[in-house]
Amino acid sequence: MRKSTAWNLHMLAGLCLVILLGIHMITTHLDLILGWFNPAGGEAINWRNVVGRGMHLSWMLFYICFLGIALYHGLYGLRSILFELTLTRGAEKVVTAVLVTFGIALFIMGAAAAVVFQSQAMGA
């Protein structure tokens, strides 16, 4: 039961990644055609536009969700690949613990960076 739930979440995360990555790509790479998210106008990677988006709570939450979903999808996929090596049960537990710890640490660092950026953008 737990394996099928985790696998279904992995597939759902992949679907969410397609949607979130699409939003990210439209925002940053189609700025000349669809400059909706560029408060200062011009290129999406212009610092004033980055800070302008950074002031919005919705963008901070978008990138935190994007980070969490990408980490889950990527690390669960890596775990699945490593498990195909026919590891012992003990080795599988170690691999899982290391990947979960690594994923949580990366998520905390990335989310903290997004929160700090948003708070500094509000002060700018």
Image (cartoon, rainbow, N blue to C red):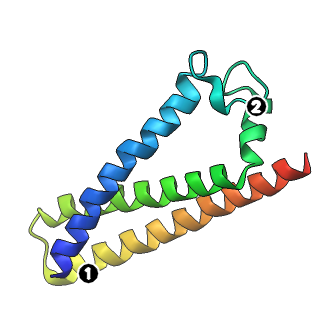
* Residue at the image position 51 percent from the left and 37 percent from the top: 24
* Residue at the image position 30 percent from the left and 74 percent from the top: 96
State yes or no: discs 2 and 1 in contact (Cβ < 8 Å): no
The residue under label 1 is which amino acid type?
A: Lys
Estimate how packed mark 1 is, as few (under 14), some (14 to 19) or many (20 or more) residues with alpha carbons within 10 Å: few
- 90 and 58: which is toward the camera: 58
Report, in whole angstroms, how far the alpha carbon at label 2 lies from the one at label 1. Answer: 48 Å
Q: Nearer the viewer, mark 2 or mark 1?
A: 2
Horizontally, residue 18 falls left or right of residue 42, namely left
Q: Which residue lies furthest to the left in this view?
A: 86
Quarter of the figure with residue 70: bottom left
- Can residue 29 be seen from the camera position used here? yes
Compared to residue 25, the image places residue 95 above or below, namely below
**Residue 13 percent coordinates (x, y):** 33, 57
Estimate how packed mark 2 is, as few (under 14), some (14 to 19) or many (20 or more) residues with alpha carbons within 10 Å: some
Q: Residue furthest top?
A: 32
**Residue 32 percent coordinates (x, y):** 60, 15
The residue under label 2 is which amino acid type?
A: Pro
- Quadrant of the drawing holding the C terminus: top right
**Residue 73 percent coordinates (x, y):** 33, 57
Compared to residue 47, the image places residue 70 above or below, namely below
* Residue at the spot of label 1: 93
**Residue 82 percent coordinates (x, y):** 20, 62
> How many numbered marks does the figure carry?
2
* Residue at the spot of label 2: 39
Q: Residue furthest right?
A: 124
* Residue at the image position 78 percent from the left and 48 percent from the top: 55
Asked which secondary structure carries label 1, the reply is helix
